Image: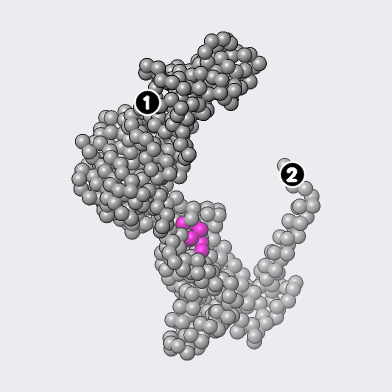
Amino acid sequence: MEYLRLARVTVGYRKGEPILSDFDLTVREGELVSLLGPSGCGKTTTLRTIAGFLFPWSGRVLLKDKDYTRVPPHRRNFGLVYQNYALFPHLSVFENVAFGLRMRRLPREEIRRRVEEALRLVSLEGLERRLPGQLSGGQRQRVALARALVIRPELLLLDEPLSNLDAKLRAGMRTELKRIQRELSVTAIYVTHDQSEAMALSDRVVLMRAGRIEQEGTPAELYFRPATPFAADFMGFTNRFDAVVEAREGGELVLRAGRVRLRVRGEDLAPGTEVTVAIRPSSLRLFPPGGEGIPGRVVSHAFQGESVQYVVETGLGELVVVHPESTPRFSPGDEVVARAAPDEVAVFPRKEDA
Amino acid sequence: MRAPRSALVVLSLSLLFLLGPFVILFWSSFGTQASLAFPPEGFTIYWFKKVLGMRMFVDAFRVSVLLALSSTAAALVLGIPAAYALVRFSFPGKSFLELLFTSPIIVPGLVLGFALLRFFTAAARYPVSLRLFLGHMVLLFPYTVRVISASLRNFDPTVEEAAVSLGAPRWSAFLRVVLPNLRAGVMAAFILAFITSFNNVPVSLFLSGPGVTTLPIQMLTYMEYYYDPTIAALSTLLILFTVVIIQLVEKTLGLSTTLGG
C-alpha cells in the first residue's frame, strides 16, 4: 500500500539553487525506509520537506492520498527525532514527553497514562523528574523517541538519531529502535550516512546522490547488487579497477585487466565493452602463487580482532583484502594470488561520469 | 600552580588603581569638614542623613529608577522579537538593520542626545517625561538586541522545531520553549540596560527639563554649586544600591550564568 508519496518535488533553501529537482519517493505503510547518502546528497532536505519545515517550490507531498504540500508542520502529526536530541532543556523528562499531548489539550489523566506508557516503551521509567541535562546521551535519545512516539504520529522521521552515541550504545539503540518501530508498526523514515546502520534497520534503502535517487531496494539488493559505481563504492566495494569484456561463456563473463583474467557472474555485456570492476575487501581471498587470479605481493597486514586486513600490491593497483582469521597467514613480502567469488564482483560498463 | 610574583604585583596595582577612587569616596563621605578633602577628619553620618532628606535627590532618584525600569522593559519588549527576527530569519536589508542596531553604541551619547532633543522638541512636542522615556528606550534598544541575539544564537533551532513538530504553532513554541531558555540572556540584558539607563548623562542632559531630572544630572547640577561630602555620601549609597541589585540577581539566578551566558 502506498502511504507517503513525494511527487516531482523541487525544493531548496536559496532561490535558483534547488537541492531536490523533480524528486519522487514512495513509502509503504508500516515500513522503515532509510535515506542513505553522503552529506550534501539531499537526504536531510527530503526529511525536512516531509516534516513541513521546507515548502516545495513545486510538486506535491501526499500522505494517504491527502495533500500535505501546504500543511504547516505543527498540524502534520509527524514525530521527529534529531541527531542532537533537541530536548527542551528547561522541562523535566515527563514534561518533555507530555509536550505534544498538552498541545493537543488532552485530559490530565490521559496525558499521565500515555507518558508513562511511552517511557515504559523506551525503558525510562523512574526518570520522569530528571532534567535533560542530568541524563546520558543514550537516555536523552530515548526521551526524544518517547516524545515523538507519544503523539501516535502518522510518520516517524529520524534524522541521524544515533550519530551522537558511542559505538557500543549505537548498536543497542539500533536494535531497540527496530523493535519499537515493529511493535508500533509506525511508518518511519530514517536519514543516515552510515550504510551499516541503514542495512541493519531498514526494510528498504534509498541511496541518494546529489539530490537524486541513485538506487533503491532492500538492504540485500543494495549490498549484493549495487547498480552504479557510486552505489558500489558506498556499499563498500572499495577495490576498483578497469577491465575489458573478453568473452561470454554460459552465465559468466570473462574479463581481462592487464595480464589478468577474471571470471565473474555476468551482466549482459558484449565482448569488447570497457568496464569498471568493483570488489569488496571481504569478497577477495588470498592464496599461495599459482593458478588463476590476480597475482601480487603482500605490502602490509593489520590485525582487526576477528579478521586481518591485507594490502596487496598488484598489477591492477593496490587491493585491500579482509580475511576472517585471527592470525595472519601471509606476511609482508609474500607472493600471493587474490581470487574473488564470481558472484560477489560488481561490473559496470564504463561511462564518462562514473 | 602558584602565580608568579610579578603577576601578583601587577594584579595588586590594577586593583589599587580600580578600587582606590571608591575607597577615597567611601572614606570621605564620613568626614566632618564642609568640603571634600582627603584624608577626611572626624567621623559623622551627617551627610547621609542630609542627602536622604533632600527632596531634589530623592525625587531625582525616583525618576531615575522609574525611567530605568520602564525604558528597560520597553527595550526588552521590542528587543526580544527584533533579536529573534535578526537571528532566525534572513531577509533583504538584514545586515543594514544589524548595523543600525549597533549605531547608538557607536554614536557618541552627546550626539544621540542632541539629535533626540531636536527630534522631540522640533518634530514632536512631547512632555519631558515621555521624551526621557523614549530617548532612553532608543539608547537601550541596541543593548538588549545584542545581548539577546547572542543568547539566541546559542540556542539550538532544532529544539524549537521539535516543539513545532509536536503541534505548537511558531508563536507558542517561542513562548513555551525559546523564551524560558533565554532567561539568562534576558536577565543579562536587563541588568546591562538598567545600569546604562541609570548612569546615563549625555542623553538625559539634553532631554531633562523643568521638574523632571534624573539623578546623575541632578548630581552634576548640585556639584556646580556645592563641593561638600553630600555627593560622596550619595555615591556611596548608589554603590550600595548597585551591590544589592547584583546580589539579588546573583541569589536568584546566579550571576556567572547571567553575565557569562
Badge number at residue A207: none
Is label 1 on the same chain as label 2? Answer: no
Kindly identify the residue that appears in the image at 46 percent across and 36 percent down.
Answer: A351
Image-quadrant location for residue A175: top left
Name the kind of residue labelled 2 in the image: Arg
Classified by dominant secondary structure, the portion drawn in magenta counts as helix
Tally of marks: 2
Kindly identify the residue that appears in the image at 48 percent across and 55 percent down.
Answer: B153
- Residue A234 to residue A294: above or below: below
Kindly identify the residue that appears in the image at 73 percent across and 56 percent down.
Answer: B11
Q: Badge 1 is on which residue?
A: A268
Q: Chain of mark 2?
A: B
Residues drawn in magenta:
B146-152
| Mark 2 surroundings within 10 Å by alpha-carbon count, few (fewer than 14), some (14 through 19), many (20 or more) | few
Residue nearer the viewer, B232 or A274: A274
**Which colour style is shown?**
one colour
Residue A327 visible in the displayed image: no
**Whole-number angstrom distance, CA of label 1 to CA of label 2:** 78 Å
Residue nearer the viewer, B222 or A43: A43
Badge number at residue B2: 2
